[in-house]
Image (cartoon, rainbow, N blue to C red):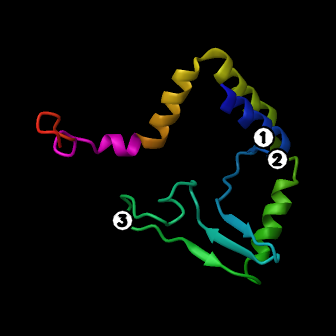
Amino acid sequence: KAIARECADWIRKKATFKSNTTQENMGGFLNIDSDNRQITTYLPLAGFTTVDIGCERGNNSYNMVNKFLAPHSQEYARLFESIWNDKTKLQDVTEEVIDSITAAYNENSAEFLYFVALYNIFNEFLEDISEDVLPNEATGF
């Protein structure tokens, strides 16, 4: 429960969550702003998994992620800022996220939250487990 509280406190201090309030699709991209204001943009992104960002292969026949450096990335930075600050397109849902986290740790035991977190971290690996890859306790291996 302490971790959930710390997470909620961290969100209150450092994060903002927004939700699309329109019926418009918004293609995903990632802007990384380095210390020297050199923005790098990656797109398209459908999610934020290692497969989606191109670090792992996954089971897609292909997954092409493009990388744009400045000055080409500047337009993506402007687009992000424009949409992020447009209250007709995005609604701040930070408090709802905090409320969900708070409800999770108020309504569930710490053990349950721990096991749910472990499951979500390792579920892809658990799907691949069979007796062939598990240690054989009878032989000690």
Give the percent coordinates (x, y) of residue 106: 68, 17
Give the percent coordinates (x, y) of residue 72: 73, 82
At 79% from the left and 69% from the top, the residue drawn is: 77
Stretch of the chain drawn in magenta: 123-134
Give the percent coordinates (x, y) of residue 114: 53, 29
Q: Which residue is mark 2?
A: 14
Q: Which residue is mark 1?
A: 11
Residue toward you, 106 or 68 = 106
Residue toward you, 2 or 47 = 2
Element class at badge 2 = helix
Q: Is residue 105 above or below residue 125?
A: above
Element class at badge 3 = loop
At 17% from the left and 43% from the top, the residue drawn is: 141
- Does the magenta portion include 132? yes
Q: Is residue 35 visible?
A: yes
At 65% from the left and 25% from the top, the residue drawn is: 1
Query: Within 10 Å of the Cα at label 2, are there few (<14), some (14-19), or many (20+) other Cα atoms?
Result: few
Q: Which residue is mark 3?
A: 61
Q: In the visual, does 137 lie left or right of 101?
A: left
At 66% from the left and 79% from the top, the residue drawn is: 68
Mark before the other along the chain sequence, 1 or 3: 1
| Rendered image quadrant of residue 134 | top left
Contact check, label 1 and label 2, Cβ < 8 Å: yes
| Residue type at the position of mark 1 | Ile
